[in-house]
Image (tube, rainbow, N blue to C red):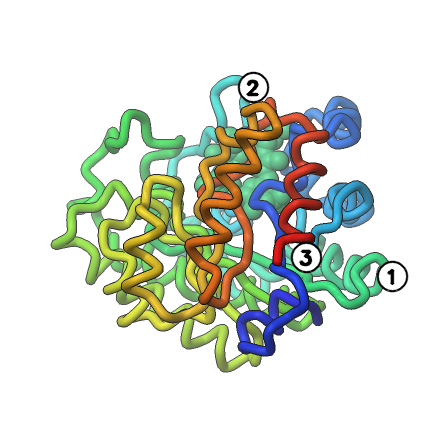
Amino acid sequence: MGILKDCIKNKRPDSIPIWFMRQAGRYLPEFREIRSRNPDFIKLCLNPELSKEITLQPLKRFAFDAAIIFSDILLIPFALGQEVKFEKNFGPKLGELNLEKLNQITDEVFIKNLKPVHDLLKITAKDKIIRGKDLIGFVGATWTLLVYMLNRKSPKKQSLDINMFNYPDQDFIIDKIIQSQKIHIKGQVENGATIIQIFDSWAGLLEEDKYEKYIYEPTKKIVDYVKTLGVEVICFPRGIKKYAEFCKIINPSAINIDYETDPKKIAEQINIPIQGGIDPKSLLFEEGDMIKEAKKYLDIFKNHQYIFNLGHGILPETSPDNVKALVNFVKDYK
Ligand code: CP3
């Protein structure tokens, strides 16, 4: 257990806790090297030894306080029997959703399909690099998984290709996703995850009158469930227009904010622990300008329980030297 947990529990760590979304990824040459030998992304995610190595790569280079497992939110649709492929310069491509097939996937089959991810956690949690640090497991939020399963690719230009809201048997699919999320979270916690992050990457696509059904209702169920397992839960409803309302209704252990949200307003409106915010593009600036932007977030959240992170995943073109400089700056910030 590490200082992220301390910060969330208001134990005031000696320094600001820090980790980055997508910290295990394409900006690291050592990741690209493994990836070039493993063209099948899903297969790589289901290889516990290689996934462990990728999970630990950023901790070997930088003074991060947590590791996030190398995996993907789309392993849930995969384990539910939907085809999931990743194409270069396109992103994820999912197969047709077959409701009959979905109905036939039992909890036992689902958990067996994700066993390699749970094995990855088990062997990673034991590694000495993790000692004193947090190990973060994750799932996609129900809405974001529904988007991928029905839209079958990332939505473009902030809009969906299909009419999600009139999709046949939508409530059956939503219930199946929630059940799968719970099983996958339990497997991660039982094998060593000390924190669970819920990525609702497409929350920003919804009109506010749809928040109740597609964000609040399912997310509350998942967050309450994670709490019964005794670990912390961080929510990232990216692009939501009502972070304060979200926190009031959902009450997660911490909230990750996106880079388009005004941090000053957040600091005024929200008093639960806050994570993230800085635009990942700031890490492409020259070092001095990047540090100035980071200092802005640190100063705004000086009197808050704050975990330094980004307002979305780190960009593949980010230089590892800049990451090193930024992490060291945050760790020395008083
Ligand atoms: O943060 C980490 O370092 C842990 C690993 C992680 C990955 N995906 C690895 C990955 C995490 C936490 C995710 C979450 C994820 N996956 C989200 C939610 C966060 C977000 O970015 O909004 C989403 C929407 C996905 C789905 C997904 N996976 C997309 C859209 C893509 C392609 C586009 C992209 O950003 O690369 C992926 C592929 C993916 N997942 C890669 C990695 C390292 C790139 C794989 C490669 O091409 O080498």
Q: Earlier in the sequence, mark 2 or mark 3?
A: 3
Q: Position of residue 295 (x, y in %)?
A: 52, 45
SS at mark 3 in the image = strand
Left or right: 185, with 199 as reference point: right
Label 1 lies in ligand 1 vicinity (Cβ under 8 Å): no
Question: Is residue 41 positioned above or below 54 on the image?
Answer: above
Pick the quarter of the image with the N terminus: bottom right
Q: Which residue is mark 2?
A: 88
Q: Position of residue 310 (x, y in %)?
A: 51, 44
Q: Earlier in the sequence, mark 1 or mark 3?
A: 3
* Residue at left offset 69%, top offset 60%: 118
Left or right: 237, with 315 as reference point: left
Q: Could you tell me if the residues under marks 1 and 3 are in contact, i.e. CB atoms within 8 Å?
A: no
- Give the Cα separation between the discs numbered 2 and 1: 35 Å
Extreme-top residue of the structure: 89
Quadrant in which ligand 1 is drawn = top right
Q: Amino acid at mark 3?
A: Ala
Q: Is residue 74 visible?
A: no
Q: Amino acid at mark 2?
A: Lys
- Give the Cα separation between the discs numbered 1 and 3: 13 Å
Q: Which residue is mark 3?
A: 66
SS at mark 1 in the image = helix
Q: Position of residue 106 (x, y in %)?
A: 51, 63
Label 2 lies in ligand 1 vicinity (Cβ under 8 Å): yes
Q: Which residue is mark 1?
A: 128
